[in-house]
């Protein structure tokens, strides 16, 4: 039963994907504008569905942070629509062709960007993902299957209905944007087996969701388990710059994956620098988990055991460790980092170069805040997800990561000798 | 037990990968030359192991084609060593940095190529893959775990031993190139769960092996199920060119994945062209599976039912179908193609462009033989595999496909507003 539903959904999306793949940039942009318009027009309906879901979630005792993510307002719906209008402005990667070479036998080799086909987005209680993912997949020439969590399903269905109305008015199949109507786990499992039709699965949510999807999927999965980002303050760092990077990285928005979760300090500057760190963190009400050596600098800090490093606090809390040298910092990150974002603060260019070359992470930064590690800040324009595994994409993923390249070979009848 | 062995193998490879990742191109090339030298020196040992395995396979009644793939000679070992010397000549993708942009806040965004980490190659009775994969993974800065089939395991161990001797002489860990000593299926299953250590699995072999690996792997898998390649001869094709592409594609080496398995002929030229096709295929002893409309042209051909199209004959056999028009050809390929290589022969540039844009395949060709669809012919220098799924790589994969890109962000202390 679940298998039949999943196979039908996936097969229809695969057919619909062919219709989107051949649209011109201009055609896609017209439909995207219509997505934005229809979402604006549907504001009352979307809000009504959302109010009911928020009430239900509140009655069920759902955590405040999740209620906040779930809740829409007229302003948030307007932001959704204008985000789609920003996607219209982004360059379309589909069709870009790069010349590779002309071979001695005269055949000409090029590579051309094409859509992936069908993307399956799996997310929890974030209704805005419905609009974002729908628009990004459409702009990159793909069909999308949206699988939203139980808490936000009615809101998401209302948003998707607005976009599907735009599709219908432009004679495009409904299945260009499908939404799984039933958040049943068996149906999710059945979807994850549709590797004949679905090209990529992008889960967004907690580590548990991502592990579940990875374990059960026969389709390639973009993995983004967590963000345990470190700032390493090297011996030659400017203390003021290092403090700014620390406070910005930890305090500006502590609950996100590019927030800092660990501070590593070169022991040669530990004494002078940690006094300043203690004052700045105290002023910003950040709780410190300190290594034995740094503990005396922080009043009210708790000591952290070796195996307690590497936690994703997602809160105004940070682990602090004094490292003996550059290699100590690298070793710590190797063991406890999450291949998301790692930052060095140093005035020593050789150390910066070595850090950039050595550290195993999707985004490596020198003298810049970890908070820049997202699609918008890195210039992608919009982000469909972040990959912390190295296949296909590594780091924040924009439109290009929703495409691949095919080889285009042209000749005048050459045959192989 | 299998789990412990697999975890140890994978964890050691992950440590070794860090040692290879930081080698310069010059250092890697010196070690690669040593791989070639040691393999040449080990010729007597490799041949002795191989003779024993060939004898055993012959006694077990193994098919002639497999015996041929398994058998090494002094010449084949020399070819292995000189293939490694060709890999030395290839450009090293690791470290290549491309500037993305400078953001308005002054941070600078670049992307730099890095190795994937640990590659697991799973293959059957082809001992030359041991040397090829060992050298390609090494040149691209990765560690490799080789899992060779039962028939060729002793030969492969002898080849790997030669390469590991070279590693030892250059103070590199053994685990840079590991070989799974036991072709036990439980051990393979356990390896496929080591997603904490292994970054990519590349199976090379029959469709059954690839389905088994895909189904059981928690690690991303490069999929290459089969090659069902078509030549579409359009109304405006030059008949002589079309015949040359047909015979080259089907006859030059019928047992490989880029050989033609289907001929599609535009009905407006069917009568004149099929007479020539029949003569040419008969002369080359190619068996024809003909659609009802083309059947009368081929003496001795069998008629093919609709659901019998799409077979990978890997033999001097071909399916022939007359299609009503261009769209009929695209529809046939959509249904029966394998996303490997598709060829159009036409003098009509608009049709060529439309074919290139529309057909869903890793390699699309206009007026060139499907036999060019491999790494060497497309200018990659060497090929580690072919991907017929769109993630990470699509089509023949060379050194670049064994790497990924990380973001490198540099600033002067910028923080996020």
Image: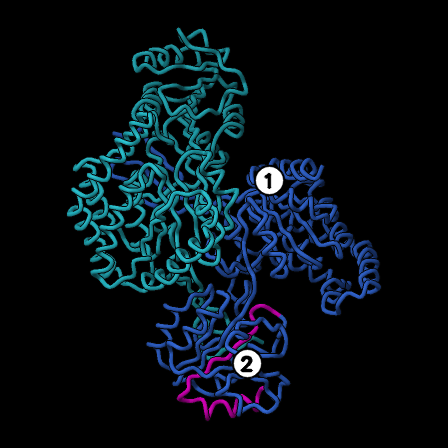
Chain colours: A cyan, B blue
Q: Position of residue A5 (x, y in %)?
A: 42, 54
- Mark 2 — on which chain does it sit? B
Choose top left, top right, bottom left or bottom right for residue A183: top left
Choose top left, top right, bottom left or bottom right for residue B371: bottom right
Label 1 element class: loop
Kindly indicate whether the residue at mark 2 contacts the one at mark 1 (C-beta within 8 angstroms): no
Q: Position of residue B336 (x, y in %)?
A: 49, 70
Choose top left, top right, bottom left or bottom right for residue B256: bottom right
In magenta stretch: residue B274: yes
Please indicate, yes or no, whether residue A19 appears anywhere in the rendered image. yes
User: For the residues marked 1 and 2, what is the alpha-carbon distance in whole angstroms?
Assistant: 45 Å
Q: Is residue B362 above or below residue A1?
A: below
Q: Residue at x 43, y 72 (%)?
A: A410
Mark 1 on the same chain as mark 2: yes
Task: Determine crowd level at label 1: few under 14, some 14-19, many 20+ residues with C-alpha closer than 10 A.
Answer: many
Point out the tag, 1 or 2, that comes first from the N-terminus.
Answer: 1
Q: Tell whether A79 sits left or right of A153.
A: left
User: Which circle, 1 or 2, is nearer the viewer?
Assistant: 2
Q: Residue at x 28, y 34 (%)?
A: A70
In magenta stretch: residue A340: no
Mark 1 = which residue?
Answer: B194
Q: Residue at x 47, y 42 (%)?
A: A213
Q: Position of residue B214 (x, y in %)?
A: 56, 52
Q: Is residue A17 above or below residue A391?
A: below
Q: Position of residue A65 (x, y in %)?
A: 31, 27
State the mark number for residue B304: 2
Q: Is residue B133 above or below residue B312?
A: above
Q: Is residue B318 above or below residue A309?
A: below
Q: Which residues are magenta?
A: B256-281
Label 2 element class: loop
Please indicate, yes or no, whether residue A242 appears anywhere in the rendered image. no
Question: Quadrant location of the C terminus of chain B?
Answer: top left
């Amino acid at each position: 039963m679940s298998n039949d539903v999943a196979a039908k959904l996936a097969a229809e999306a695969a057919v619909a994907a062919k219709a989107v793949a051949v649209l011109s940039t201009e055609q896609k942009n017209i439909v995207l504008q219509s997505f934005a318009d229809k979402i604006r027009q549907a504001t009352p309906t979307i809000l009504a569905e959302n109010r009911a879901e928020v009430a239900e979630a509140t009655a069920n005792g759902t955590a405040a942070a999740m209620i906040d993510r779930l809740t829409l307002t007229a302003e948030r719906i307007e932001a959704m629509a204008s985000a789609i209008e920003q996607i219209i402005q982004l360059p379309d990667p589909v069709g870009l062709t790069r010349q590779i070479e002309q071979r001695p036998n005269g055949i000409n080799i090029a590579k051309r960007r094409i859509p992936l086909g069908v993307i399956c987005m799996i997310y929890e209680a974030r209704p805005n993902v419905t609009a974002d993912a729908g628009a990004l997949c459409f702009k990159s020439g793909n069909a999308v299957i949206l699988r939203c969590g139980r808490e936000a399903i009615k809101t998401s269905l209302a948003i998707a209905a607005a976009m599907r109305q735009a599709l219908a008015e432009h004679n495009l199949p409904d299945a260009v944007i499908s939404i799984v109507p039933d958040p049943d786990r068996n149906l999710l499992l059945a979807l994850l087996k549709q590797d004949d039709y679905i090209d990529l699965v992008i889960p967004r949510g907690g580590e548990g969701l991502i592990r579940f999807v990875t374990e059960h999927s026969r389709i390639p999965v973009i993995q983004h388990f967590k963000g345990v980002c470190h700032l390493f303050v090297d011996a030659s760092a400017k203390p003021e710059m290092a403090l700014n990077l620390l406070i910005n990285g930890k305090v500006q928005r502590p609950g996100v994956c590019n927030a800092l979760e660990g501070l590593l300090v070169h022991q040669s500057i530990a004494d002078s620098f940690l006094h300043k760190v203690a004052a700045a963190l105290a002023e910003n009400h950040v709780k410190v988990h300190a290594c034995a050596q740094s503990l005396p600098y922080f009043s009210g800090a708790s000591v952290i055991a070796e195996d307690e490093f590497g936690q994703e606090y997602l809160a105004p809390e940070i682990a602090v460790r004094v490292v003996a040298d550059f290699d100590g910092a690298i070793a710590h990150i190797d063991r406890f980092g999450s291949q998301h974002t790692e930052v060095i603060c140093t005035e020593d260019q050789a150390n910066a170069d070595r850090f950039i070359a050595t550290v195993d992470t999707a985004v490596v930064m020198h003298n810049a805040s970890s908070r820049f590690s997202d699609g918008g800040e890195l210039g992608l324009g919009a982000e469909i997800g972040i990959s912390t595994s190295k296949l296909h994409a590594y780091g924040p993923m924009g439109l290009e990561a929703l495409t691949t390249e095919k080889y285009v070979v042209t000749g005048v009848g050459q045959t192989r000798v």
